[in-house]
Amino acid sequence: MPLRLKPPVRRAVLVALAVLLLVLGFIALLLGPAEVSPGQVGRVVASHLGLGELQGTDGMADAVVWHIRLPRIIGAMLVGAGLSLAGAMLQGLFRNPLADPGLIGVSSGAALGAVTAIIFLPMLGFGGVYGLPLLAMAGAVGITFLIYNLSKVGGRTHVAAMLLTGIAVNAIAQAFIGLAVTVFATDAQLRTVTFWTLGSLAGLSWESAIALALLIVPGVFISLSLARPLNAFLLGEVEASHLGVNTQAVKRWIIVLGSLMVGVTVAFCGIIGFIGLVVPHIIRISFGPDHRLLLPASALLGGITMVVADTFARTIMAPAELQIGILTAILGGPFFLGLLLAGRKKLTV
């Protein structure tokens, strides 16, 4: 697959993914323990947009569609886009398809920040609505910078060192989380922390969906400006610098953007693994490594993947619900093992 795809091809791929995302989002609105018809969905959405009125039998549909399913589906799209885009950027930065936000410790750093907010901010009389997401994002950014600097060998990022550092950071973060939960957490806080470790979209509301959008949507548009520098990074950092790319600035932007998007998803949804690993890799092997297509296509396919996974998670065991972090781990784990087996001859420690 050539690096440079023609603009009409890129546009066709992105339009197809965008249409598929909207279609699957509409289908997801129809599915669940409470049955609603396409006509009811249309009337509910139209009424809230001021374009129509509800009928007498649409009260239940209004509660289910507008207040429960729609913010959750929009949140799923945003979470999938943020995680996939973060994974695509980190893989481009490290020039390795194994650089997943969960594997290299970014998600654990965000979870550590979230757990700190849950347990310790109430003790100090701080927190409120913004304490948890702020600490989760701070944990993600700090851990990513730490991993990036510890992975340098001779001034360059060494992939094996990155993976080993990520494993160590994951273990340390999980140890601190376990210590905080064991020593300081109340029973209520212990139940809340369990939410972050398993991952779920069940708690998403319009307020959390808007908060996700405020960080992820600008992040998506800013990341698109990094497509050409990331294409230059495919040749190596030195070569990219010779081509006029400010490599240090690009690294900082990628680390900050990726960490913020991972941090805000962990803050509201817990740890959802492997989306940032699997989705960019599927786009890369299907259409090539051109980041002008890889970045936006990863965001769209990530949204599609999360909508499908969340719909499956909330319907397969209805009225109970399967934690989506469990589902993505079951599906993503074998995919990751396949990547390792396929590239085992190239991996050296």
Image: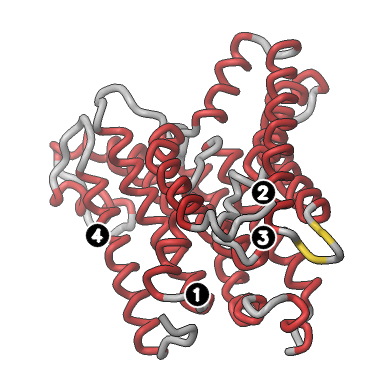
**Residue 328 pos. (x, y %):** 42, 40
- Colour treatment of the image: secondary structure
Of mark 2 and mark 3, the one earlier in the sequence is 2
**Labels 3 and 4 touching (C-beta < 8 A):** no
At label 4, counting other C-alpha atoms closer than 10 Å, the crowd grade (few under 14, some 14-19, many 20 or more) is few
- Which residue in the structure is indicated by mark 2? 163
How far is mark 1 from mark 2, CA to CA?
21 Å
Identify the amino acid type marked 1. Answer: Pro
Q: Which amino acid, mark 3?
A: Leu
Q: Nearer the viewer, mark 1 or mark 2?
A: 2
Identify the residue position indicated by label 4 in the image: 23
- Eye-nearest disc, 2 or 3: 2
Q: CA distance from mark 2 to mark 3?
A: 20 Å
Label 2–label 3 contact, CB within 8 A? no
Name the quadrant containing residue 128: top right
The CA distance from mark 4 to mark 2 is 37 Å
Mark nearest the camera among 1 and 4 is 1
Q: Which residue is mark 3?
A: 257
User: In what element is the residue under mark 1?
Assistant: loop
* Residue underneath mark 1: 289
Name the N-terminal-most of marks 1 and 3.
3
First in sequence: mark 4 or mark 2?
4
